[in-house]
Image (cartoon, rainbow, N blue to C red):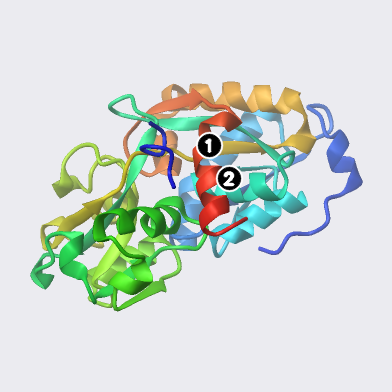
Amino acid sequence: MLKKALFAATALVALAAGAAANAADLKEFRIGILGGENEADRLRNYACLSDHLKKEFGFEKVSLFPAADYNGVIQGLLGGTLDFAELGASGYAAVAIKDPKAVTPILTTQQTDGSTGYYSIGLALKSSGIKTIMDAKGKKLGYADPDSTSGYLVPLTQIPKTTGVPNDKFFGSTQFNGGHENNLLAAYDGKVDVAVDDSSGVGDFKDGFTSGTFRKEVDKGAVDPNKLVEVWRSPLIPNGPLVVRNALGTEWQTKLTDFFMKLPTADAKCFNAIEGGDFKGYVKVTPDFYNAVIDVRKAAIGG
C-alpha cells in the first residue's frame, strides 16, 4: 500500500573506463529519454538541452536516446550505456530495486504551486456518460506503460481503494497502450473507456492543467479538453527524478545539479520544452524521497 498519500533499448555491458570517468575525460554524454511520446517530438524538445550541455561542459558529443518504452531507459542506466535520464518515480524504483548503486537522483521538478508531486488522473470522453470511476464498471481501462508510475503502478494500487476490488475484477478489461500519449489518444478515439494519465492537477482543466501528457496533447491540438472529463484522481505522487549514473562520480553529480538548477532562468523555453508544461523549476532531492514508491513497487509488481 502507498504510505498515506504517496508522499504524506537493450543495455550493453558498461565499459570498464566508465567507472573512472571524470570532468577531464568525459567526451560523450548519453541521455536517455523515456518512451510514451512520439520520437520526433522528444528529440526536438531535447535538442536545446544538448546544445547547452556541449557549451557548458565542452562535450564532443551529446547523444540522445529516445527509448521505445520506459524499460529501455531503465536497462540503459543499469547497463551503463546511459549517463543521465529523467525518470518517473516507479522507473527510478525499478532501477533502485535491481541495483541501488547504479544511479543517484539529484533533482526533481517543482509545480507552479510549489509542490513536488503530481497526480494520476483518469480521463474519459464526456460523451461516454462516465462521470466517476464507479461508472466505468465493466468498461475498458487503458494503462500507459508497465514502468509508469501514474500510468500503471498508482492506478493499479489506488483505484481499488475506491472500487473495493482489483482492477482486473472491476473493469471488463485492461490494456497497455504504449505510453501516455498513446493511452490518452486511445481514450479520445474511443478505443478504451478510461485512460490514466500523468498531470500536475494544478490550473485549469480546459488547458490540460499546467503540465503532464494531457497538457502536451492540448497544446499540440491533438485533443479538445471540452470533449473529456476527469473521472478519477490519485493521491499525490512524488515527481520523478533527474538521475546521474554513479560511475561518473560525485563531481559530475554536483556539476549537473548546478547546471539544471540554473536552466529554468537561463533558458526558460528550453526548460519548458524538456519538461512539457509550466513548472516553477527544479529542487534538490535524495533517494529517501522515493522510499514509499519503492515499497509499493516491490509489493505490487516487483522490480
Q: Quadrant of residue 246?
A: top right
Q: Is residue 44 left or right of residue 163?
A: right
State the residue at coordinates (66%, 22%). 254
Q: Nearer the viewer, residue 252 or 160?
A: 160
**170, above or below 149, in the image:** below
Q: Is residue 260 visible?
A: yes
**252, above or below 139, in the image:** above
Q: Quadrant of residue 197?
A: bottom left
Image coordinates of residue 248 in percent, x first then y, are 77, 34
What element does badge 1 sit on? helix
Please tell me the numbered disc located at residue 194. Answer: none
State the residue at coordinates (77%, 29%). 249
State the residue at coordinates (79%, 59%). 12
Contact flag, marks 1 and 2 (Cβ < 8 Å): yes
Front of the two marks 1 and 2: 1
Q: Residue furthest right?
A: 16
**83, above or below 163, in the image:** above
Amino acid type of the residue tagged 2 in the rendering: Tyr
Q: Nearer the viewer, residue 256 or 8?
A: 8
| Residue count near mark 2 (Cα–Cα under 10 Å), binned few <14, some 14–19, many ≥20 | many
What element does badge 2 sit on? helix
**Residue with the mark numbered 1:** 290
Amino acid type of the residue tagged 1 in the rendering: Tyr
Q: Is residue 79 left or right of residue 297?
A: right
Q: Earlier in the sequence, mark 1 or mark 2?
A: 2
Image coordinates of residue 271 in percent, x first then y, are 43, 35
Q: Quadrant of the C terminus?
A: bottom right
State the residue at coordinates (78%, 27%). 23
Q: How many marks?
A: 2
Question: How far separated are the C-alphas under marks 1 and 2?
Answer: 8 Å
**Residue with the mark numbered 2:** 92
